[in-house]
Structures are given as structure tokens and as C-alpha cells.
Image (cartoon, rainbow, N blue to C red):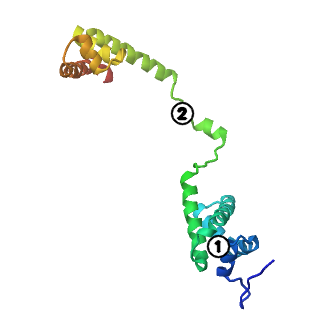
Amino acid sequence: MTTYVTTNGRADIAQLVIAAQRGENEAFGQLYEQFERTVFAIALRRLGDFNEAQDHTQDVFVQAWAKICQLREPAAFAGWIRSITLRMAINRMVRRKPCMATDPADMEANTVESTTPLSLVLAGERRREVRDGLGRLKELDRETLEAFYVRGHSLLEMADEFDAPLGTIKRRLHVARKRMAKEVEPMAV
């Protein structure tokens, strides 16, 4: 195993990068040992989760190993690995789903049912009031509202059905809505 040590006892980063670019696994291993704590610290600060930061650290070094040949300035490895760490952390944060652990008993206790006996009774009364309101409307208003809301016809289909211009159908629908609102207004009060 080749070591790249300078006078201060640390490996020369530029020499390690050049060796790693030539395919020397040991050189990249030394880079890993030298920068693992830095990458982990950045990941932990960004992600806020110890286990996720550990996984992220591994992912960063896998990415760095795959892209080491793209680094043009070997002495800039420290900044390069930091930028990979930050970019990948941002991507990881954007892609992760929010995680909230909740006890099922708490969920059950705090869940509001959308359908209650009261809401079913009120919905039935509203339907009855709407039917009664439709019955009190003139035939043209009733047919216009039923075509649009009950049968789901488009304005163009209604224009064909009623043999009337599109603008006339829009006006009829608008007028019929207003008249219907007056018919069911007492129910709202």
C-alpha cells in the first residue's frame, strides 16, 4: 500500500486525488478517512438525523469515487467534496417524505368523523330543500339547472339541446342559479 505523507504526518490531498484518479483504491480510502468526519458533520447539520447522515456520508463518497476523474484541480478536493455533500443533502431533503410517528390510539382519539348521524340528516334535508326549490322554479329555470347540474351537460350540449345560442344558455344558467338561491335561502337562515 502506498502512503502519501507530508512532514506534518497527513497525506498530501493533491497527491491522493491524482492517485485516486489513476484508479488507486488505497488513495481514495485515505481521502475517505481524512474527510469522513467533515462530510458527516455537514450531513448531520443539514439533515438533522444521525442515521440519515451516516447513509448520506456513504452516498457522498460513492458519488465522489464515481466522479473523481472530473475534478480538474486535485488540491480543491476539500471544497469539491463539501459541495457534493451540500448538493446531495439538499436533494435528499427535497425528496424525503415528512416522517411523523403517531400512535394509532392517538390518531383514533383525535380523528373527526366526516359522516355523523347529524350530518347525514342535514344532508338529507338539504337535498329535500333543493328538490322542493327546483319544483317551485319555472320550467325553463328548472330544466336549465337539471341539465347542467344533474345530467352534467356542458354549455355547448345545452345550447344544442335547447336550440339556443351559447350566450343565452350562460345567461339562463346565471338567472336560474339566482332564482334557486332565493328559493332555498330560507333554509340557510
Amino acid under disc 1: Thr
Who's the residue at 60% across and 70% down the image?
81
Instruction: Classify the position of the C terminus by image quarter.
Output: top left
- The residue sitting at the right extreme is 1
Q: Position of residue 4 (x, y in %)?
A: 73, 83
Kindly indicate the quadrant of the structure image that contains residue 131.
top left
Amino acid under disc 2: Val
Task: Looking at the picture, tell me which residue is in the foreground, 105 or 8.
Answer: 8
Task: Name the N-terminal-most of marks 1 and 2.
Answer: 1
What label sits on residue 150 in the rendered view? none
For residue 99, above or below residue 152: below
Give the SS element for disc 1: helix
Residue position for label 1? 38
Who's the residue at 56% across and 65% down the image?
86
Q: For the residues labelled 1 and 2, say whether their Cβ atoms are less than 8 Å apart.
A: no
**Is 139 displayed left or right of 61 in the figure?**
left
Instruction: Classify the position of the N terminus by image quarter.
Output: bottom right
Who's the residue at 64% across and 66% down the image?
64
Neighbor class of circle 2 (other Cα within 10 Å; few <14, some 14-19, many 20+) is few
Can the viewer see residue 86?
Answer: yes
- Label 1 – label 2 distance at C-alpha: 47 Å
Can the viewer see residue 137?
Answer: no
Residue position for label 2? 112
Task: Looking at the picture, tell me which residue is in the foreground, 135 or 11.
Answer: 11
**Is 110 displayed left or right of 27 in the figure?**
left
Kindly indicate the quadrant of the structure image that contains residue 15.
bottom right
